[in-house]
Image (spheres, grey):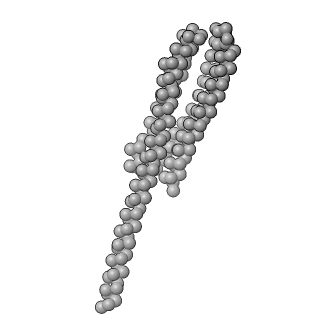
Amino acid sequence: MEENITLDEMRSQIALLKEKLDKESIVNDRLLRDALKHKMNNFKWGSVFEYCSCIFVIIFGNITIFQLVHSWPFVIATTILMIICILATYYTHSKANTKDCNGNLLTVAKKMRQIKREYHLWLYFAIPAITIWIIWFSYLLVTETTFGIHLVMAMFFGAIIGSIIGLFLRKKILDTCDDIISQIEE
């Protein structure tokens, strides 16, 4: 009789232990999903910065450019370049949706890999485009203004600072993608 009571107690303790373990995995799953949502929200702030930068260039940059070189084709080309940047950023970052964290996490990892690939492919467009833009703007500054060489030097200094900021943001976004992918794979 005493053996049956001990056996029943052991069974109830095992059932209680299983119940606690089941709750623990749910908590871990929730913590993982909340952490992923937080990282994806931080990820979206990078796109907000890019949107604001492009809009700033479209509005204030073009006014300054036109006052310096009086070239409508260059202003239009700059505007088109910034619109392409906005659209590419929107297309790439629209894949990072926090609602996906509630579903299949493998889908989130796949989307993060796509974002990383698109960030790498973007350089094939961005580097030649910005190089052509800088050469064209330098030419206009030297030929259209009396103090063009000084403006070109200032532009190169600004381009270096902008490149450093851009590479830092790019690295931060790619690191966030890597973190999300590694957390999901664990």
Percent across and percent down for residue 113 are: 52, 43
Judged left or right of residue 65, residue 32 is left
Judged left or right of residue 118, residue 96 is left
- Nearer the observer, 47 or 154: 154
- Residue 168 to residue 61: above or below: below
Residue at 47% x, 41% y: name it.
42
Asked whether residue 146 is in view, the answer is yes
Residue at 32% x, 87% y: name it.
4
- Residue 26 to residue 56: above or below: below
- Residue 152 to residue 18: above or below: above
Percent across and percent down for residue 163 are: 62, 30
- Residue 64 to residue 103: above or below: above
Percent across and percent down for residue 112 are: 50, 43
- Nearer the observer, 158 or 29: 158
Percent across and percent down for residue 68 are: 59, 11
Judged left or right of residue 120, residue 13 is left
Q: Can you say which quadrant of the picture contains the N terminus?
A: bottom left
Counting labels gives 0
Asked whether residue 73 is in view, the answer is no
Residue at 44% x, 42% y: name it.
41
Residue at 68% x, 16% y: name it.
150
Farthest-out residue, bottom: 1
Res 24 → quadrant:
bottom left
Judged left or right of residue 134, residue 55 is left
